[in-house]
C-alpha cells in the first residue's frame, strides 16, 4: 500500500457514537402556582474528549456471561480541540448521613422530531462528593436522566438535565433523609476550563425535583420545604425561583407544570427497570474516572433499549459483515426492520428512503432554499424528509425539478451525497489518497476529491473486497447502513466500529491517545441477545415507521 497514502490517513480519526424518541418519563408532573425563571443555554465553552474501551467475553448468543468496561482514569492527555458536548457529574449529601450512592444514568437523545426513547448508560457507585466525567456520543439538547439509589438499592431520587453545547459540570444534592424525603437539587452550567465550577458570566441552572408514588414533580421553587439542607459550600445559594432551560418550561416536551412524569414505565429498557446489580454489574467510580457514552450505548445495546423497539433480524446472522452497523443505527431509531422480522440486507435503497434516513441521522443547518419537486407531492410519505435533506445539501434534483424518489441509488450516489451534505474536503494529493482502490480510475473526475475526503475520514466501507469501490453498483441496505454509520462516526456522534471492510481503518491514527483502566460490568441473567454483539436492533431505511406513519420510515408504502 502506498506509504504517502498511509501518511495522509494517519492524520484523521475514526470517531465514536449516539441516542432515542422522548420516553414516557418525559411528560411532567409538577406543582403549579409558583413562578419559574427560564434561562437560555450558553454556547461558549469547550469540553474534553474522553475515551473508553471494552472487553467482552461471551459463551453463547443468548446467554450473557460477562462484560468488562474499561474507563479512562487520567484525563491530562485528552484533546480539548473544538466544542464537544460532555458533562461531569458530582453527587452531594451535605448532612453526612450517606457515604455512597448509586447513580443510574440514561440518555434521551434529541432527534429531528422530538426525543428518542431512553437508553441505559450504566449504574455507577459514587462516594459522596465524588465526580466522574462522561463524554462522546452526546449533542446539545440531549437530556440526561439520573435515578438515584442507596447502597441497599432503595430508590431515593430522580433528576434530569439538558446537555449544553460544551462541557458541563453537574451537581446533584440529596436531602438529609433521602429514603424518606426524595427531593434532589440539580445545579449545573458551562465549565469551559473544566475546573469543576460553573463559569462566571454564564447561566446557572438550579432547580428541585421531588418524587412521590414513583412520580416526579419538577418544582418551581423551594418554598414548600427547608431548602438550607441542600446548600453545598462552593455552589451558588438556592434561588427563590427555579432556573430551568427553556425546553423544560416551554414547548411540547416541557417538564415543568405538566401532568405526570413517571419514574418507571412498562416500555422502559430492561436495565432501567432492574434492581441495580441484578442485570448488569454496578461500576465503581474512582477519582477522576471518565466514561465514553458512545461506547456504553453499544455495550448495553441489548438490555439498554426500550422494549417498544423491534430488535433482532431473522436474516442478519451473528457473523454477518454489517451486523454492528445495522444494529447500532436501529438502536438509534434511524433505521427499522420489516413487520415480518427481516432486515433484507441485499435490497436496494431508493432516493426517498435514503432521504428519510439522512433526516433522522443528521441535524444541521439549511444551506439553500427548498424547491417544489414536480414528482413529490405534499402528500407523499417522504415529502418532509426530501425537502429538508435537500435544504441541508445532501441530495440534489435529478433533472430540472424532478427528484425521482423511487430511483435506486448507486454506491457513488450514496458517497457523493454524504460528502456534499457534510461539506467534507480532501487535503493532500487526491490521486495518492485514491490509490488505495484498485478501481480508482472508474471514479469520474468531478467526484474524485469528494471520495478522497470520505476516504481520509474513514467513511468508505467496501464489501466484500475492501480495495474495490464498485461505484456503479446499486447500493444495498446493508452497505448504506455501514456508510451512514461511518459518516456519523466521522462527526464524533457514535462509537467506532471495528471492521475489516472500513478502508484504512488500521492506518487511521486516533488523536485522543489515552490509557485505560478496567471497570466491571456483569450482566446477570439470560437475555434475548448478547450485549454489543451487533446482531440485534431494529432496522433501516426501507421500513415502515413505528406508529403507522409513512414518513421517515424509509420504506415505500406497499413494499411488504
Image (spheres, grey):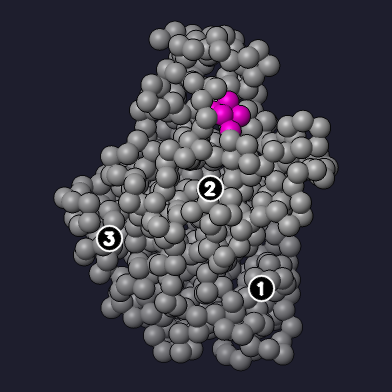
Q: Which residue does the numbered mark 2 point to in the structure image?
A: 541
Label 2 environment density (alpha carbons within 10 Å; few <14, some 14–19, many ≥20)? many
Viewer-nearest residue: 232 or 21: 21
Label placed on residue 220: none
**Relative to 258, residue 352 above or below:** above
The residue at the point 54 percent across, 22 percent down is: 471
**Relative to 151, residue 10 above or below:** above
Q: Badges 1 and 3: C-beta atoms under 8 Å apart? A: no
Q: Which residue does the numbered mark 3 point to in the structure image?
A: 528
Q: Which residue does the numbered mark 1 point to in the structure image?
A: 254
The disc, 1 or 3, on the residue closer to the chain's N-terminal end is 1
User: What is the magenta range?
Assistant: 409-413
Residue lying furthest left in this view?
A: 59
**Relative to 457, residue 130 above or below:** below
Q: Quadrant of residue 500?
A: top left
Instruction: Answer yes or no: is residue 520 visible.
Output: no
Q: x, y (%) of residue 481?
A: 48, 40
Label 1 to label 3, Cα distance in Å?
Answer: 35 Å
> Does residue 474 appear to the left or right of 326 in the view shown?
right
The prevailing secondary structure element of the residues shown in magenta is helix
Q: Inspect the magenta stretch and tell me whether residue 412 lies in it.
A: yes
The quadrant of the rendering that contains the N terminus is top left
Q: Quadrant of residue 142?
A: bottom right
Viewer-nearest residue: 556 or 136: 556
The residue at the point 38 percent across, 21 percent down is: 465
The disc, 2 or 1, on the residue closer to the chain's N-terminal end is 1
Helix, strand or loop at disc 3?
loop
Label 3 environment density (alpha carbons within 10 Å; few <14, some 14–19, many ≥20)? some
> Does residue 14 appear to the left or right of 320 in the view shown?
right
Q: Badges 2 and 3: C-beta atoms under 8 Å apart? A: no
Amino acid at each position: 500500500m502506498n506509504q504517502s497514502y498511509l501518511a495522509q490517513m494517519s492524520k484523521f480519526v475514526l470517531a465514536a457514537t449516539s441516542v432515542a424518541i422522548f420516553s414516557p418519563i418525559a411528560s411532567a408532573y409538577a406543582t403549579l402556582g409558583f413562578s419559574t425563571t427560564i434561562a437560555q443555554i450558553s454556547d461558549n465553552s469547550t469540553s474534553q474528549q474522553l475515551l473508553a474501551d471494552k472487553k467482552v467475553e461471551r459463551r453463547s448468543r443468548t446467554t450473557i456471561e460477562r462484560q468488562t468496561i474499561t474507563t479512562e482514569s487520567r484525563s491530562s492527555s485528552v484533546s480539548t480541540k473544538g466544542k464537544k458536548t460532555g458533562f461531569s457529574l458530582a453527587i452531594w449529601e451535605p448532612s453526612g448521613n450517606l457515604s455512597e450512592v448509586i447513580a443510574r444514568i440514561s440518555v434521551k437523545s434529541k432527534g429531528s422530531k422530538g426525543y428518542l426513547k431512553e437508553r441505559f448508560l450504566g449504574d455507577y457507585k459514587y462516594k459522596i462528593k465524588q465526580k466522574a466525567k462522561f463524554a462522546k456520543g452526546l449533542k446539545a439538547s440531549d437530556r440526561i436522566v439520573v435515578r438515584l439509589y442507596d447502597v441497599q438499592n432503595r430508590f431515593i431520587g430522580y433528576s434530569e438535565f439538558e446537555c449544553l453545547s460544551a462541557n458541563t459540570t453537574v451537581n446533584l444534592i440529596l436531602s438529609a433523609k433521602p429514603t424518606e424525603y426524595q427531593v434532589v437539587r440539580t445545579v449545573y452550567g458551562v465549565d469551559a476550563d473544566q475546573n469543576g465550577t460553573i463559569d462566571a458570566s454564564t447561566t446557572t441552572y438550579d432547580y428541585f425535583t421531588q418524587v412521590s408514588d414513583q412520580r416526579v414533580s419538577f418544582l418551581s421553587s423551594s418554598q414548600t420545604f427547608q431548602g438550607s439542607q441542600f446548600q453545598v459550600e462552593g455552589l451558588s445559594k438556592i434561588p427563590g425561583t427555579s432556573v430551568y432551560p427553556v425546553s423544560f418550561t416551554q414547548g411540547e416536551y416541557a417538564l415543568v407544570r405538566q401532568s405526570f412524569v413517571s419514574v418507571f414505565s412498562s416500555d422502559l429498557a430492561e436495565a432501567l427497570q432492574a434492581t441495580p446489580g441484578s442485570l448488569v454489574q454496578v461500576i465503581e467510580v474512582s477519582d477522576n474516572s471518565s466514561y465514553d457514552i458512545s461506547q456504553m450505548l453499544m455495550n448495553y445495546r441489548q438490555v439498554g433499549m426500550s422494549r417498544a423497539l423491534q430488535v433482532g433480524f431473522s436474516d442478519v446472522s451473528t457473523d454477518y459483515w454489517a451486523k454492528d452497523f445495522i444494529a447500532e443505527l436501529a438502536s438509534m431509531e434511524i433505521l427499522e426492520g420489516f413487520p415480518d422480522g427481516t432486515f433484507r440486507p441485499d435490497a436496494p435503497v431508493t432516493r426517498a428512503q435514503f432521504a428519510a434516513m439522512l433526516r433522522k441521522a443528521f441535524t444541521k443547518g439549511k444551506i439553500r432554499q427548498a424547491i417544489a419537486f414536480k414528482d413529490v407531492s405534499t402528500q407523499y410519505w417522504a415529502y418532509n424528509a426530501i425537502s429538508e435533506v435537500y435544504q441541508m445539501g445532501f441530495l440534489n434534483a435529478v433533472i430540472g425539478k424532478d427528484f425521482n424518489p423511487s430511483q435506486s441509488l448507486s454506491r457513488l450516489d450514496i458517497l457523493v451525497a454524504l460528502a456534499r451534505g457534510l461539506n467534507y474536503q480532501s487535503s493532500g494529493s487526491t490521486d495518492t489518497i485514491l490509490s488505495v482502490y484498485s478501481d480508482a480510475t472508474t471514479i469520474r473526475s468531478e467526484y474524485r476529491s469528494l471520495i478522497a475526503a470520505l476516504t481520509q475520514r474513514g467513511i468508505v466501507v467496501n464489501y466484500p473486497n475492501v480495495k474495490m469501490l464498485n461505484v456503479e453498483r446499486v447500493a444495498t441496505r446493508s452497505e448504506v447502513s455501514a456508510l451512514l454509520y461511518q459518516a456519523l462516526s466521522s462527526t464524533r456522534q457514535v462509537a467506532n466500529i471495528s471492521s475489516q471492510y472500513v478502508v484504512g481503518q488500521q492506518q487511521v491514527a486516533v488523536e485522543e491517545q489515552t490509557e485505560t483502566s478496567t471497570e466491571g460490568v456483569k450482566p446477570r441473567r439470560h437475555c434475548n441477545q448478547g450485549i454489543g454483539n451487533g446482531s440485534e436492533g431494529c432496522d433501516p431505511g426501507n421500513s415502515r415507521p413505528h406508529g403507522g406513519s409513512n414518513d421517515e420510515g424509509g420504506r415505500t408504502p406497499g413494499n411488504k
